[in-house]
């Protein structure tokens, strides 16, 4: 009972603080999108628009009103999910986002599976073999993953595995030939094609996703490995491990069941955060692989100066980030016995 | 500067050699680990390259030669030529100046801002702390590249704006760190002593708190430089950073991309340069953390 009440109390405080952060997010995107550009109208109508067109758009954007009123309108638009149309597609930005986000989520999910599947065991192995050659190898590998400019690695990988060896598909989500052949249910191409039983589409999709996902996965594995290693070292240095060893448990048992068991919660929060930062890598990797996702949408709008669409994208990323943070926080509270 | 009490003068003069002594110790420690040594070597090479760029470059990085485009690496052009016949090796060498400029300017802006926010929030606590940290949190709720993208989009693409954008997004972790450090010795006796002597808050922060935060902030800044380089290269790659014909490494990769399939050298060499420098900073930062943190040193 009291535990529940305390949980509710924490949740209440949490949601208040999230509301404040969300408000700050709106202020920030408003300032960047509307206040900082020298002339937001020019960006929309172009250099050689007539005076009437300019005036029209100027009023349409509400730039003739005082700043606070503009902000109130902006807040109203956000709350009602009315972000206007994207200049490039002519479609509402919200429906554009609904179209492009699943492609990115599919890529990021695939990547995080690779990243966590690779990173966590490597981190454990490095911690267990601290200061041996394998630890140094893992450390250099993970720092390498941290240091690579992912857009460049993507190009080199395309050069080797696509142009050179022909092992994987090139750009896009699948071969041109298959586009539009799969009924969209989950918008995750791998799942949709499997559900429809179209295995050649599935294979094409897998062929296309594997390279960008592996690269994104490697870069997040780098982070996950390092964190896992340091969490594990914290545990391995504690006395209960020694006690368990003295009582006759094998190293394998103490390493995996005791130490790793205790860092699972921390690990989940780290993986949630790593998932969020995959969005960042996605912006670059999607450009290289012509992946029709969120990152490409963002950059293509950026290059034509459609600030409205850009700031909506930025806002969405912010909200996703906050949500992931909140999720990892809740997971922590739910699964860590000490917080109860 | 206000007048310094005479008592502190001998103190400071004793501190200087001690600082140099410590630096020597740290360098010796770093030189013992091969990975940090690699980092130091690469960064020294980068510094030398930037300093002596005109001497090291074999060609003018901007001169086009349309009779000599897309030549593969050879003795005349170590790393080949690009689509306008410019020597890629010379462009890389001159590009190191841009990279160094970016790192230096960003660090010069980010360090003080982060320290100011962090120490003020940590020292005063209460409402000031809450407001400042809330602002920090908002900036932290974006991946740094995406926020930089937004800033550059608003300000217009250019090298200077890219630097401003990166600086605007890179300070929050520093502020967080400085605040955490400040909190640990805010109530220390020597701070109370300074306060009882009538020192103003600004003076206490500047003289007693900032120096204590500096070591960890410097490590963090070093670690950050790898991120800064990658973000700058990413912006350059997207066409939002340095504009042509500047030989910025990320931008070189972006223009080389079109010719990549048949002319691999256009993208390969600038990429290796970015990778080497950011790896060097990561290795150095990693080593610095071990060198300056005795707890970490035992644990590693």
Image (tube, rainbow, N blue to C red):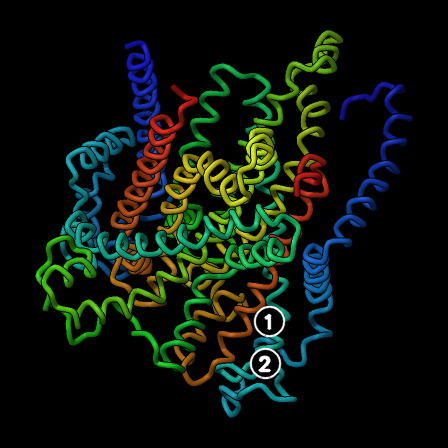
For this view, does A119 lie left or right of residue A84? right
At 42% from the left and 59% from the top, the residue drawn is B240
At 34% from the left and 23% from the top, the residue drawn is A14
Q: Which residue is mark 1?
A: B92
- Picture layout, residue A14 above or below residue A257: above
Q: Quadrant of residue A20?
A: top left
**From the image, which quarter does the C terminus of chain B lie in?**
top right
Q: Which residue is mark 2?
A: B79
Badge 2: few (under 14), some or many (20 or more) residues near its Cα, within 10 Å?
many
- The answer to whether mark 2 and mark 1 are in CB contact below 8 A is yes
**From the image, which quarter does the N terminus of chain B lie in?**
top right
Q: SS of the residue at dot 1?
A: helix
Q: SS of the residue at dot 2?
A: loop
Foreground pick, A35 / A331: A331
At 68% from the left and 24% from the top, the residue drawn is B209
Mark 2 against mark 1, which lies toward the viewer? Answer: 2
Foreground pick, A61 / A284: A284
Foreground pick, A129 / B199: A129
Q: Chain of mark 2?
A: B
Q: Residue A52: in sight, yes or no? A: no
For this view, does A198 lie left or right of residue B25? left
- Picture layout, residue B83 above or below residue A60: below
Q: List x then y, in percent, for residue B135.
A: 43, 30
What mark, if any, has residue A231 been given in the picture? none
Badge 1: few (under 14), some or many (20 or more) residues near its Cα, within 10 Å?
many
For this view, does B9 lie left or right of residue A212? right
């Amino acid at each position: 009972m009291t535990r529940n009440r305390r949980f509710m109390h924490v949740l209440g405080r949490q949601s208040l603080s999230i509301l404040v952060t969300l408000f700050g997010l709106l202020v920030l995107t408003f300032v960047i999108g509307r206040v900082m550009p020298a002339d937001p109208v020019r960006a929309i109508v172009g250099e050689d628009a007539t005076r009437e067109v300019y005036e029209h758009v100027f009023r349409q954007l509400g730039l003739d009103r005082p700043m606070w009123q503009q902000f109130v309108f902006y807040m109203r638009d956000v709350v009602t999910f009315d972000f206007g149309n994207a200049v490039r597609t002519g479609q509402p930005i919200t429906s554009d986002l609904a179209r492009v986000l699943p492609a990115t989520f599919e890529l990021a999910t695939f990547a995080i599976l690779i990243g966590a599947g690779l990173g966590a065991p490597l981190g454990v192995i490095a911690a267990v073999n601290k200061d041996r050659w394998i630890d140094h190898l893992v450390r250099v590998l993970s720092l390498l993953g941290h240091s690579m400019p992912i857009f460049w690695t993507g190009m080199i990988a395309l050069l080797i595995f696509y142009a050179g060896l022909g092992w994987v598909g090139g750009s896009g989500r699948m071969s041109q030939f298959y586009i539009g052949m799969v009924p969209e249910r989950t918008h995750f191409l791998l799942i949709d094609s499997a559900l429809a039983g179209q295995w050649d589409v599935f294979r094409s999709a897998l062929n296309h996703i594997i390279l960008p996902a592996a690269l994104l996965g490697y870069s997040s594995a780098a982070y996950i490995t390092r964190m896992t290693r340091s969490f594990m070292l914290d545990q391995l240095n504690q006395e209960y491990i020694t006690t368990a060893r003295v009582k006759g448990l094998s190293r394998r048992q103490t390493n995996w069941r005791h130490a790793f068991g205790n860092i699972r919660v921390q690990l989940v929060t780290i993986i949630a955060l790593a998932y969020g930062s995959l969005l960042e890598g996605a912006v670059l990797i999607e450009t290289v692989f012509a992946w029709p996702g969120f990152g490409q949408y963002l950059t293509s709008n950026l290059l034509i100066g459609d600030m409205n669409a850009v700031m909506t994208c930025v806002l969405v990323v912010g909200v996703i980030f906050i949500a992931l943070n909140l999720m990892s926080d809740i997971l922590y509270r739910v699964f860590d016995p000490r917080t109860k | 500067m206000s007048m310094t009490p005479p008592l502190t003068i001998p103190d400071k003069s004793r501190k200087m050699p001690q600082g140099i002594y410590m630096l020597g110790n740290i360098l010796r420690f770093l030189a013992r680990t091969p990975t940090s040594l690699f980092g130091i070597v690469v960064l020294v090479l980068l510094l030398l390259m930037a300093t002596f760029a005109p001497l090291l470059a074999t060609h003018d990085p901007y001169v086009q030669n349309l009779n000599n485009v897309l030549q593969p690496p050879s003795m005349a052009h170590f790393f080949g030529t690009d689509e306008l016949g410019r020597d890629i090796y010379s462009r890389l060498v001159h590009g190191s100046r841009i990279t160094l400029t970016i790192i230096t300017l960003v660090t010069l802006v980010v360090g003080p801002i982060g320290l100011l926010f962090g120490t003020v929030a940590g020292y005063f606590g209460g409402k000031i702390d809450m407001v400042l940290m809330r602002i920090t949190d908002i900036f932290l709720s974006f991946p740094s590249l995406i926020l930089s993208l937004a800033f550059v989009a608003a300000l217009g693409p250019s090298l200077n704006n890219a630097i401003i954008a990166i600086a605007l997004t890179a300070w929050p972790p520093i502020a967080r760190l400085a605040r955490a450090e400040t909190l640990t010795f805010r109530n220390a006796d020597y701070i109370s002593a300074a306060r009882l002597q009538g020192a103003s808050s600004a003076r206490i922060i500047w003289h007693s708190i900032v120096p204590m935060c500096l070591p960890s902030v410097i490590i963090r800044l070093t670690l950050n430089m790898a991120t800064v380089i990658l973000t700058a290269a990413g912006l350059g790659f997207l066409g939002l950073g340095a504009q042509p014909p500047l030989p910025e490494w990320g931008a070189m990769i972006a223009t080389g991309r079109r010719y990549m399939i048949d002319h691999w050298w256009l993208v390969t060499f600038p990429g290796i340069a970015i990778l080497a420098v950011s790896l060097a900073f990561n290795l150095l930062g990693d080593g610095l953390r071990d060198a300056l943190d005795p707890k970490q040193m035992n644990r590693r």
